[in-house]
Protein backbone atom coordinates (compact mmCIF):
# COMPACT_ATOMS: atom_id res chain seq x y z
CA UNK A 1 0.00 0.00 0.00
CA UNK A 2 1.25 3.44 -0.88
CA UNK A 3 0.19 5.70 1.97
CA UNK A 4 -0.03 9.45 2.14
CA UNK A 5 0.59 11.55 5.25
CA UNK A 6 -1.00 14.97 5.42
CA UNK A 7 -2.11 17.56 7.96
CA UNK A 8 -5.73 17.18 8.98
CA UNK A 9 -8.20 20.00 8.34
CA UNK A 10 -11.69 21.00 9.52
CA UNK A 11 -13.35 18.70 6.99
CA UNK A 12 -11.58 15.73 8.65
CA UNK A 13 -13.00 16.35 12.15
CA UNK A 14 -15.89 13.87 12.00
CA UNK A 15 -13.93 11.10 10.31
CA UNK A 16 -10.98 11.52 12.66
CA UNK A 17 -13.24 11.46 15.73
CA UNK A 18 -14.80 8.20 14.46
CA UNK A 19 -11.35 6.70 13.83
CA UNK A 20 -10.21 7.56 17.36
CA UNK A 21 -13.45 6.25 18.89
CA UNK A 22 -13.03 2.91 17.06
CA UNK A 23 -9.55 2.72 18.62
CA UNK A 24 -11.07 3.32 22.09
CA UNK A 25 -9.42 6.72 22.41
CA UNK A 26 -11.16 9.91 23.36
CA UNK A 27 -11.32 12.86 21.04
CA UNK A 28 -11.31 15.49 23.81
CA UNK A 29 -9.29 18.43 22.64
CA UNK A 30 -9.87 17.67 18.95
CA UNK A 31 -11.48 20.87 17.68
CA UNK A 32 -11.42 23.16 14.68
CA UNK A 33 -8.69 25.08 16.48
CA UNK A 34 -6.48 22.05 17.15
CA UNK A 35 -7.08 19.94 14.03
CA UNK A 36 -4.05 21.48 12.29
CA UNK A 37 -1.87 19.64 14.83
CA UNK A 38 -3.04 16.20 13.69
CA UNK A 39 -1.48 14.17 10.92
CA UNK A 40 -3.39 11.57 8.95
CA UNK A 41 -2.02 8.48 7.25
CA UNK A 42 -4.39 7.62 4.40
CA UNK A 43 -4.53 4.82 1.86
CA UNK A 44 -4.86 5.44 -1.86
CA UNK A 45 -8.65 5.72 -1.45
CA UNK A 46 -8.42 8.43 1.22
CA UNK A 47 -9.36 6.14 4.14
CA UNK A 48 -7.62 6.94 7.42
CA UNK A 49 -5.14 4.21 8.37
CA UNK A 50 -3.33 6.11 11.10
CA UNK A 51 -3.06 9.37 12.98
CA UNK A 52 -0.86 11.24 15.37
CA UNK A 53 -1.82 14.40 17.21
CA UNK A 54 -0.05 17.00 19.27
CA UNK A 55 -1.21 19.36 21.99
CA UNK A 56 0.74 22.60 21.94
CA UNK A 57 1.61 24.82 24.87
CA UNK A 58 4.40 27.34 25.48
CA UNK A 59 6.84 26.23 22.79
CA UNK A 60 6.49 22.51 23.32
CA UNK A 61 4.21 19.77 22.12
CA UNK A 62 2.69 16.72 23.76
CA UNK A 63 2.24 13.82 21.36
CA UNK A 64 -1.02 11.94 21.65
CA UNK A 65 -3.50 9.81 19.79
CA UNK A 66 -0.94 7.69 17.94
CA UNK A 67 -3.15 5.10 16.29
CA UNK A 68 -2.60 2.89 13.27
CA UNK A 69 -4.92 0.30 11.78
CA UNK A 70 -3.95 -3.34 12.15
CA UNK A 71 -1.54 -4.43 9.45
CA UNK A 72 0.19 -1.07 9.02
CA UNK A 73 3.93 -1.36 8.71
CA UNK A 74 6.25 -0.11 11.45
CA UNK A 75 7.73 2.27 8.87
CA UNK A 76 4.34 4.02 8.72
CA UNK A 77 4.50 4.67 12.46
CA UNK A 78 8.05 5.99 12.13
CA UNK A 79 6.97 8.19 9.23
CA UNK A 80 4.06 9.65 11.24
CA UNK A 81 6.38 10.47 14.13
CA UNK A 82 9.14 11.98 11.98
CA UNK A 83 6.60 14.07 10.07
CA UNK A 84 5.21 15.31 13.40
CA UNK A 85 8.74 16.25 14.45
CA UNK A 86 9.03 18.28 11.27
CA UNK A 87 5.65 19.94 11.83
CA UNK A 88 6.63 20.84 15.40
CA UNK A 89 9.89 22.33 14.17
CA UNK A 90 8.03 24.35 11.51
CA UNK A 91 5.67 25.66 14.21
CA UNK A 92 8.66 26.89 16.23
CA UNK A 93 8.55 24.36 19.07
CA UNK A 94 11.66 23.54 21.05
CA UNK A 95 10.70 20.08 22.31
CA UNK A 96 8.18 17.25 22.06
CA UNK A 97 7.00 15.11 24.94
CA UNK A 98 5.08 11.89 25.13
CA UNK A 99 3.58 9.93 27.96
CA UNK A 100 3.07 6.18 28.06
CA UNK A 101 2.44 3.41 30.54
CA UNK A 102 3.80 0.81 28.11
CA UNK A 103 7.46 0.37 29.01
CA UNK A 104 7.95 -1.91 26.00
CA UNK A 105 7.62 1.12 23.70
CA UNK A 106 10.56 2.98 25.27
CA UNK A 107 13.30 1.26 23.17
CA UNK A 108 11.38 2.14 19.99
CA UNK A 109 11.22 5.81 20.95
CA UNK A 110 14.87 5.72 22.09
CA UNK A 111 15.81 4.79 18.52
CA UNK A 112 13.97 7.91 17.30
CA UNK A 113 15.95 10.14 19.66
CA UNK A 114 13.55 10.45 22.60
CA UNK A 115 15.01 10.42 26.11
CA UNK A 116 13.28 9.37 29.29
CA UNK A 117 12.59 12.24 31.70
CA UNK A 118 11.28 12.26 35.24
CA UNK A 119 7.96 13.89 36.11
CA UNK A 120 9.69 16.78 37.85
CA UNK A 121 11.61 17.52 34.61
CA UNK A 122 8.41 18.25 32.67
CA UNK A 123 7.75 21.92 31.89
CA UNK A 124 5.26 23.38 34.35
CA UNK A 125 3.00 24.40 31.43
CA UNK A 126 2.36 20.74 30.55
CA UNK A 127 0.69 20.21 33.91
CA UNK A 128 -2.20 22.40 32.72
CA UNK A 129 -3.14 19.88 29.99
CA UNK A 130 -5.99 17.48 30.81
CA UNK A 131 -4.13 14.60 29.15
CA UNK A 132 -1.13 15.05 31.47
CA UNK A 133 -3.40 15.34 34.53
CA UNK A 134 -4.94 12.00 33.55
CA UNK A 135 -1.59 10.32 32.83
CA UNK A 136 -0.18 11.41 36.18
CA UNK A 137 -2.87 9.27 37.85
CA UNK A 138 -1.99 6.15 35.82
CA UNK A 139 0.41 3.67 37.41
CA UNK A 140 3.74 3.14 35.64
CA UNK A 141 3.51 6.36 33.62
CA UNK A 142 6.68 7.18 31.73
CA UNK A 143 7.58 10.47 30.08
CA UNK A 144 9.87 10.93 27.11
CA UNK A 145 11.31 14.07 25.53
CA UNK A 146 12.65 14.89 22.09
CA UNK A 147 14.60 18.14 21.68
CA UNK A 148 14.04 19.86 18.34
Image (tube, helix red, strand yellow):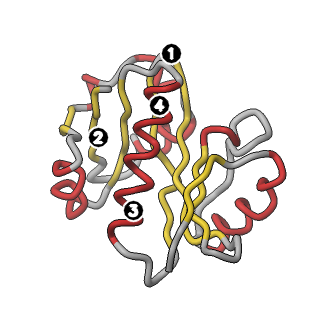
| Of callouts 1 and 3, the N-terminal one | 1
| Of callouts 4 and 1, the N-terminal one | 1
Circle 1 residue:
58
Q: Distance between the Cα atoms at labels 4 and 1?
A: 12 Å
Which mark lies nearer to you, 2 or 1?
1
| Of callouts 4 and 3, the N-terminal one | 3
Q: Label 4 neighbourhood size at 10 Å, few (<14), some (14-19), many (20+)? A: many
* Residue that lies at the very extreme toward the bottom in this rendered image: 71
Find residue 6 and report its horizontal and vertical position in percent. Answer: 61, 52
Q: Distance between the Cα atoms at labels 4 and 3?
A: 17 Å
Q: Distance between the Cα atoms at labels 4 and 2?
A: 18 Å
Which mark lies nearer to you, 4 or 1?
4
Q: Distance between the Cα atoms at labels 2 and 1?
A: 18 Å
Please tell me the numbered disc located at residue 134. Answer: none
Please tell me the numbered disc located at residue 143. Answer: 2
Q: Quadrant of the C terminus?
A: top left
| Of callouts 3 and 2, the N-terminal one | 3
| Of callouts 2 and 1, the N-terminal one | 1
Q: Label 3 neighbourhood size at 10 Å, few (<14), some (14-19), many (20+)? A: some
- The local secondary structure at tag 1 comes to loop
Find residue 138 and report its horizontal and vertical position in percent. Answer: 38, 51
- The local secondary structure at tag 2 comes to strand
Q: Which residue is more in the foreground, 100 or 43?
A: 43
Amino acid sequence: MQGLIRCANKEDLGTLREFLTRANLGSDGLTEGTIEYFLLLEDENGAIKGTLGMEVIEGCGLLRSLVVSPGQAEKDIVLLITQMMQLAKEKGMKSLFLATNKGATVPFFDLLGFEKVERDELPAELYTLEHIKHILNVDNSLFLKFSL
